Image (tube, rainbow, N blue to C red):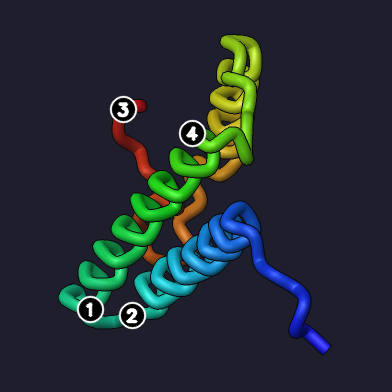
Amino acid sequence: MFENQQMTPAAMTFDCISSTRFLALCDTYGAMQSSSHQLRQAYARMAQDHLSLVDEWYNLAQSKGWHSVPDAGAGSVTQAINRVRNVMSVTSGQTGGTGQPLYYSGQY
């Protein structure tokens, strides 16, 4: 049935991107669910490693001409920042019962 079908290098690359993104998501979920600081840190490091691999795969795809993404304009970046700030202002003061804010309150 699959004898004459070949997977192209581009298709393999995008399959690797998809799989690695999924692994980063699983790592992030593991970090959120972990009660151990050491385990949480290990999951966070693995998530970062997987996200770095995704960047490498995207760079490969872009260098081969398989994937092109236009740069985000200044307006798009400003709009995204404003949306995040809006969400943060709505959630400010919410503590989830912990006494600690639900968001990062440092500088951006």
Q: Position of residue 95 (x, y in %)?
A: 45, 56
Callout 2 touching callout 4 (CB < 8 Å): no
Q: Which mark is residue 63?
A: 4
Q: Are marks 3 and 4 in contact (CB under 8 Å)?
A: no
Of callouts 4 and 1, the N-terminal one: 1
Q: Name the residue that disc number 3 marks.
A: 107
Asked if disc 4 and disc 1 are in contact, CB closer than 8 Å, the reply is no
Name the residue located 29 percent from the left edge and 82 percent from the top edge. 35
Q: Mark 1 — residue?
A: 39
Please give the name of the residue rendered at 47% of the width and 64% of the height, measured from the top-left corner.
20
Instruction: State the count of labels.
Output: 4
Query: Of circles 3 and 4, which is in front?
Result: 4
In the picture of the structure, the residue carrying the numbered disc 2 is: 34
Judged from the image, the secondary structure of the residue bearing numbered disc 3 is: loop
Assess whether mark 1 and mark 2 are in contact (beta carbons under 8 angstroms): yes
Q: Is residue 65 left or right of residue 101?
A: right
Could you tell me how far apart the alpha carbons at marks 2 and 4 are, in whole angstroms? 38 Å
Residue nearest the observer in this picture, 5 or 41: 5
Give me the residue at 53% from left, 43% from top: 61
* Circle 2: residue type: Ser
Pick out the residue farthest to the left: 38
Query: Which numbered disc flags the more N-terminal residue, 2 or 4?
Result: 2
How would you rate the neighbour count of disc 2 (Cα within 10 Å): few for under 14, some for 14-19, many for 20 or more? some
Amino acid at circle 4:
Ser
Q: Amino acid at mark 3?
A: Gln
Q: Earlier in the sequence, mark 3 or mark 2?
A: 2
